[in-house]
Image: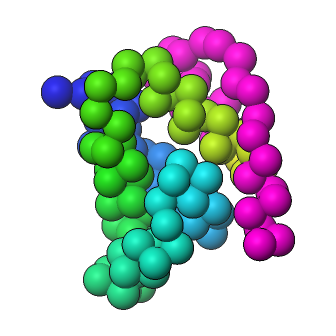
Amino acid sequence: MTSGILSDDGLMYIAARLGAEWTLVVSHLGLKQVEIEQIQLDNPYKTINQTSIALQRWRDRQEGLKDTTLQQQLFSALKSCDRTDLLEEVQERYNIKGKVTPNLCNSKRNS
């Protein structure tokens, strides 16, 4: 069972703080727009639940990847979507060190 930031509780922690950028972050992580919209329809007016469900689906699809790889993907998505504040908060809370190389999440905003 996954622990730390990739646990259900860890992803809920991120979900509770992510806010409106959650769709950009999970899109960056590979969820399709139709799936994001279905999560929203299934959980109306519950943004934190929507976000948590989307993050858990992403995590659960990454079978076979190391936790460090998943953390790197998540942190890259946060940084690329201008949420370095949350990235730093999570790294401090879970005592995770390391550099994150950004990807181009901003380009998804213009798509």
Q: Position of residue 20 (x, y in %)?
A: 62, 69
Q: Farthest left residue? A: 1
> 36 or 63: nearer the eye?
63
Answer above or below: position of 33 versus 31.
Answer: below
Answer above or below: position of 6 versus 39.
Answer: above
- In the figure, is residue 33 to the left or right of 8? right
Q: Quadrant of the N terminus?
A: top left
What span is in magenta? 84-111
Answer above or below: position of 99 versus 6.
Answer: above
Q: Position of residue 13 (x, y in %)?
A: 42, 45
In percent of the image, x 28 and y 44: which residue is there? 60
Answer above or below: position of 48 versus 84.
Answer: below
Quarter holding residue 108: bottom right
Quarter holding residue 23: bottom right
- In the figure, is residue 87 to the left or right of 101? left
> 17 or 70: nearer the eye?
70
In percent of the image, x 33 and y 60: which residue is there? 53
Q: Quadrant of the C terminus?
A: bottom right
Q: Position of residue 109 (x, y in %)?
A: 77, 68
Report the number of numbered marks: 0
In percent of the image, x 37 and y 80: which residue is there? 38
Q: Position of residue 100 (x, y in %)?
A: 70, 24
- In the figure, is residue 21 to the left or right of 50? right
- In the figure, is residue 79 to the left or right of 30? right
In percent of the image, x 65 and y 44: which residue is there? 78
Does residue 38 show up?
A: yes
Quarter holding residue 98: top right
Instruction: Report if residue 2 lies within the magenta region.
Output: no
Does residue 46 show up?
A: no
